[in-house]
C-alpha cells in the first residue's frame, strides 16, 4: 500500500518534468515531506482541452455518486489488478486516470523493535509518477470535491523486504499512454501497472518521526542507515 509520501519539490518543477501546465487553486498545498491522507496534493491529469495539467486534489477518493462525501469509503489506495472490474473504479480506469508526482514514498518494515519507516525513491533522483485515479463529486450548492486514489501492485524485489505491495509507477515514456483517456482503453492502460524495476529503486531507513503526520521537514528523509540491520523479505 501507500499511506504517506514526500512532495517537497516546487510544483512548477513537477509540471516542467512532464510538460504540463500548473493550475493554481485555493487548495494549493505547500511543499511537504510527509503528505498524509485526507489532505491536498499535486496531481497530474489530462485537461479537457487535451493538455496536461498539475492541480491539487484531495487524497482519498470521493466517488461522484456518493450521497454524502463525509460518509462511506474514501480509499487512498486501489489494487491495480482489480481496478478495471470493481464498480467503484471501473469507469475511472477508462476515463479518469492520473499520476501523482512525488519525490518518494514511505513504507514500514516490521522489526523486533517495532515498525521501522523506510524512504523509497528512484535511484537517479527523478520524480516518481505514481499511477492514480481521480473523480469529481458535486451535489446542489455544495462546493465540488475533486479527489484521487493511488493504484498499487505487487512489490518488486527491493520493496518486498518492506511490504508486499507498492504504488504502481508509470515510466515517463509511458505517460502519454496512461494519461490519454481519449480512446477509453482501460485494458491497455492496465497493462502499464506492474512492479517497477527493482534496480531503479533506492530504499533506506529514516527517522520514526515520520510516523506522526504533524511532523515535517527535510530531516524526515535523512538516512538512518548507521547501525541498521536489514531483515530478509517477509514470508
Image (tube, rainbow, N blue to C red):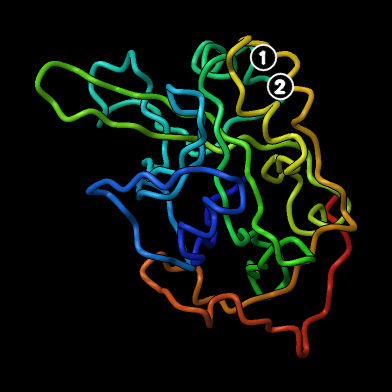
- In the rendered view, tell whether residue 80 sits above or below residue 32: above
Could you tell me how many numbered marks the image carries? 2
Is label 2 in a helix, a strand or a loop?
A: helix
Residue 228 on image: x %, y %: 77, 82
Mark 1 and mark 2 in contact (Cβ < 8 Å)? yes
Q: Quadrant of residue 159?
A: bottom right
- The relative height of residue 188 versus residue 45 in the rendered view (above or below) is above
Q: Which residue is mark 1?
A: 186
Q: Mark 1: which secondary structure?
A: helix
Q: Position of residue 43 (x, y in %)?
A: 48, 43
Near-viewer residue (117 or 4): 4
**In the rendered view, would you say 178 is above or below 20?**
above
Q: Residue at x 46, y 57 (%)?
A: 11
Identify the residue at horizontal 79%, vertical 65% (top origin).
123
Q: Residues within 10 Å of mark 2 (few under 14, many from 20)?
A: some
Q: Which residue is mark 2?
A: 189
Foreground pick, 217 / 19: 19
**How many angstroms separate mark 2 from mark 1 (CA)?**
5 Å
Amino acid at each position: 500500500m501507500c499511506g504517506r509520501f514526500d512532495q517537497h519539490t516546487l510544483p512548477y518543477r513537477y509540471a516542467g518534468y512532464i510538460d504540463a501546465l500548473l493550475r493554481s487553486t485555493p487548495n494549493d498545498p505547500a511543499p511537504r515531506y510527509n503528505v498524509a491522507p485526507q489532505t491536498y496534493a499535486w496531481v497530474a491529469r489530462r485537461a479537457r482541452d487535451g493538455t496536461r495539467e498539475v492541480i491539487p486534489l484531495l487524497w482519498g477518493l470521493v466517488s461522484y455518486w456518493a450521497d454524502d462525501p463525509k460518509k462511506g469509503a474514501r480509499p487512498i489506495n486501489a489494487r491495480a489488478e482489480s481496478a478495471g472490474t470493481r464498480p467503484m473504479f471501473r469507469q475511472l480506469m477508462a476515463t479518469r486516470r492520473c499520476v501523482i508526482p512525488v519525490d518518494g514514498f514511505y513504507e514500514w518494515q516490521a522489526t523486533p523493535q517495532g515498525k521501522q519507516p523506510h524512504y523509497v525513491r528512484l535511484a537517479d533522483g527523478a520524480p516518481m509518477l505514481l499511477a492514480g485515479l481521480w473523480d469529481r463529486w458535486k451535489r446542489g450548492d455544495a462546493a465540488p470535491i475533486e479527489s484521487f486514489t493511488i493504484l498499487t501492485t505487487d512489490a518488486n524485489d527491493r520493496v518486498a523486504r518492506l511490504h508486499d505491495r507498492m504504488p504502481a509507477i508509470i515510466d515517463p515514456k509511458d505517460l502519454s499512454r496512461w494519461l490519454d483517456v481519449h480512446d477509453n482503453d482501460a485494458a491497455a492502460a492496465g497493462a502499464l501497472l506492474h512492479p517497477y524495476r527493482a534496480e531503479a529503486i533506492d530504499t533506506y531507513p529514516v527517522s520514526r518521526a515520520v510516523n506522526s503526520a504533524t511532523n515535517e521537514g527535510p530531516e524526515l528523509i535523512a538516512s538512518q542507515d548507521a547501525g541498521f540491520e536489514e531483515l530478509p523479505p517477509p514470508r
